[in-house]
Image: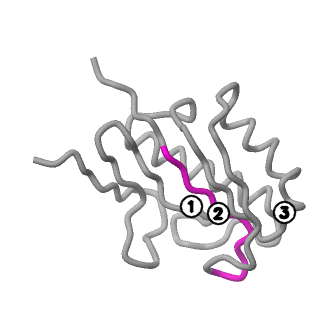
Amino acid sequence: MTDRQEFAVPGLAPPISHYCDAVRFGDLLFISGIVGVDAQGRVVGEGDAARQTRQIFENMKKVLDAAGAGFGDVLKVTVFLTDIEDRARINPIRQEFFGNARPASTLVQVAKLVRPDLLVEIEAVVGLPRKG
């Protein structure tokens, strides 16, 4: 018996490669990089990092819900931006979703993401709540 569980979350666009939305191992959940697309894979907010970030966190909420967790359980996020200047535009949205919870964080500017119309990608590591 293994403590490993893969998640394919309903309501998210299908993966574009050989990966799943998240993997649970023991009390940890590793969420794959999420981009600002709807369930059909269409970009939400083309050219708008803030709208893409809101979609990312709405998608992340679906993954967290599927695993029985919430934003307060997120331990670490890694944020990839194609323009570091977008940091100021995405931070208020991040604060809206995380509330008082402050995960560890890394912010990286990248030359490009998997599609040219994407401006932001965020991955996360979550500490799952213990049951009982």
Q: How many marks?
A: 3
Q: Which residue is mark 3?
A: 84
Q: Amino acid at mark 2?
A: Glu
- Magenta segment: 115-125
Q: Which residue is mark 1?
A: 34
Secondary structure category for the residue under label 2: strand
Instruction: Identify the residue shown where x is 69% and y is 63%.
Output: 80
Neighbor class of circle 1 (other Cα within 10 Å; few <14, some 14-19, many 20+) is many
Can you say which quadrant of the picture contains the C terminus?
A: top left
Q: Nearer the viewer, residue 16 or 104?
A: 104
In the image, is residue 122 part of the stretch drawn in magenta? yes
In the image, is residue 80 part of the stretch drawn in magenta? no
Q: Is residue 103 left or right of residue 60?
A: right
Instruction: Identify the residue shown where x is 35% and y is 59%.
Output: 8
Considering every residue shown, the one lying at the far top of the view is 132
Instruction: Identify the residue shown where x is 39% and y is 27%.
Output: 129
Is tag 2's residue or tag 1's residue first in the polypeptide sequence?
1
Q: Which residue is mark 2?
A: 121
For the residues marked 2 and 1, what is the alpha-carbon distance in whole angstroms? Answer: 5 Å
For the residues marked 1 and 3, what is the alpha-carbon distance in whole angstroms? Answer: 18 Å
Is tag 3's residue or tag 2's residue first in the polypeptide sequence?
3
Specify the quadrant of the image occupied by residue 38.
bottom right
Indicate the position of residue 33 as horizontal and vertical percent values.
54, 62
Indicate the position of residue 4 as horizontal and vertical percent values.
24, 50
